[in-house]
Amino acid sequence: MSGRKETVLDLAKFVNKGVQVKLDGGRQVTGTLKGYDHLLNLVLDEAIEFLRDPDDPLKTTDQTRRLGLIVCRGTAVMLVSGSDGTAEIANPFVQPDGA
């Protein structure tokens, strides 16, 4: 064993593919993963940020803004997932109104 820490997340399979990244503070971006390092710093190309709801900063809206080529600092990365094959589903735990 080399004693070197290795990341649990294997990002090699996402290089040059679309990813969704959730960042500390509620920001969410999508883009093409161009590179990463062992500290989980990510380089995203053609990045798009989903703007947050001004009334509830933890919710995102359908409004977006184009960011282009960005670096996401590893200390701010909370979640990385592939954007291919994902879909939003209704929350099964939300009670219908009037119940």
Image (cartoon, helix red, strand yellow):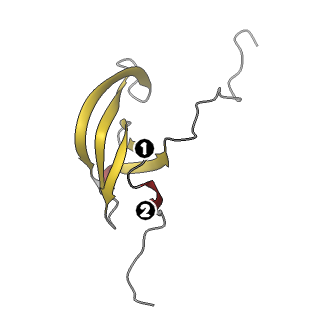
Q: Residue furthest right?
A: 99
Q: CA gap, disc 2 to disc 1?
A: 12 Å
Crowding at mark 1 (Cα within 10 Å: few <14, some 14-19, many 20+): many
Whole-percent x, y for residue 47 in the image: 31, 38
Numbered circle sitting on residue 5: none
Query: In the rendered image, which quarter is residue 38 located in?
Result: bottom left
Going by the numbered disc 2, the residue's amino acid type is Ala
Q: Is residue 13 above or below residue 20?
A: below
Q: Name the secondary structure under disc 2.
A: helix
Q: Residue furthest bottom?
A: 1
Whole-percent x, y for residue 45 in the image: 28, 43
Q: Quadrant of the N terminus?
A: bottom left
Query: In the rendered image, which quarter is residue 51 located in?
Result: top left
Residues marked 2 and 1 touching at CB (< 8 Å) = no
Going by the numbered disc 1, the residue's amino acid type is Gly
Crowding at mark 2 (Cα within 10 Å: few <14, some 14-19, many 20+): few
Q: Name the secondary structure under disc 1.
A: strand
Query: In the rendered image, which quarter is residue 96 located in?
Result: top right
Q: Is residue 22 above or below residue 41?
A: above
Quick check: 70 left or right of 50?
left
Closer to the camera, 26 or 21? 21
Whole-percent x, y for residue 84 in the image: 52, 41
Judging by the rendered image, the residue that carries numbered circle 2 is 12
Instruction: Identify the residue shown where x is 38% and y is 36%.
Output: 26
Quick check: 53 left or right of 90?
left
Judging by the rendered image, the residue that carries numbered circle 1 is 18
